[in-house]
Amino acid sequence: MTELALRQESDEEERRRLGDRLREARKYLGLKQEEVATYLKIPRTALTDIENGQRRVEALELTRLAKLYRQPVAFFTGEDEASANLPVDVAHLARRAADLSQEDRDELGRFAEYLRTRARAGQG
């Protein structure tokens, strides 16, 4: 394969990953494609193409989507690898928890441990 063909294949894969992350975030928030398309002022079919990795996303569109989905742009582009590897709901929780006081985050940690323990006890 030529270098150009490899680069095109890589670009297509990156668009697919970006589209997957965008779709997951939209679904997590319970938004319909039509609602998001209206927010972006693009046809719903264009949003479908974005989510399927068949259309490039303009920088302005990605910025607006990140704001709507309450995620940093880097989450969608994969530049923030730690966040990009987390499920959408966990990344969302982490950002929400970051705004809490240290005391509240400690309490949240204890509650998470309680939930893990309860889940393990239910399995046994």
Image: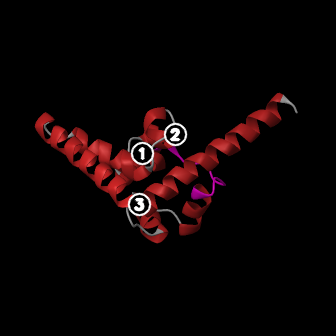
Q: In the image shown, does 18 or 47 lie closer to the viewer?
A: 18
Asked if residue 25 lies in the magenta stretch, the reply is no
In 3D space, how far apart are the residues under numbered discs 1 and 2 (Cα atoms)?
11 Å
Residue position marked by numbered label 1 in the rendering: 63
Can you tell which of label 3 and label 2 is closer to the viewer? 3
Residue position marked by numbered label 2 in the rendering: 77
Q: Residue at left 58%, top 56%? A: 50
Asked if residue 52 lies in the magenta stretch, the reply is yes
**Marks 1 & 2, CB-CB < 8 Å contact:** no
Q: Residue at left 31%, top 48%? A: 93
At label 1, the amino acid type is: Thr
Q: Position of residue 8 (x, y in %)?
A: 75, 39
The magenta segment is 51-59
Residue position marked by numbered label 3 in the rendering: 28
Label 1's element? helix
At label 2, the amino acid type is: Thr
Q: Pick whichever of labels 1 and 3 is earlier in the sequence.
A: 3
In 3D space, how far apart are the residues under numbered discs 3 and 2 (Cα atoms)?
18 Å
Specify whether 83 is left or right of 78.
left
Quadrant containing the N terminus is top right
Q: Position of residue 85 (x, y in %)?
A: 49, 40
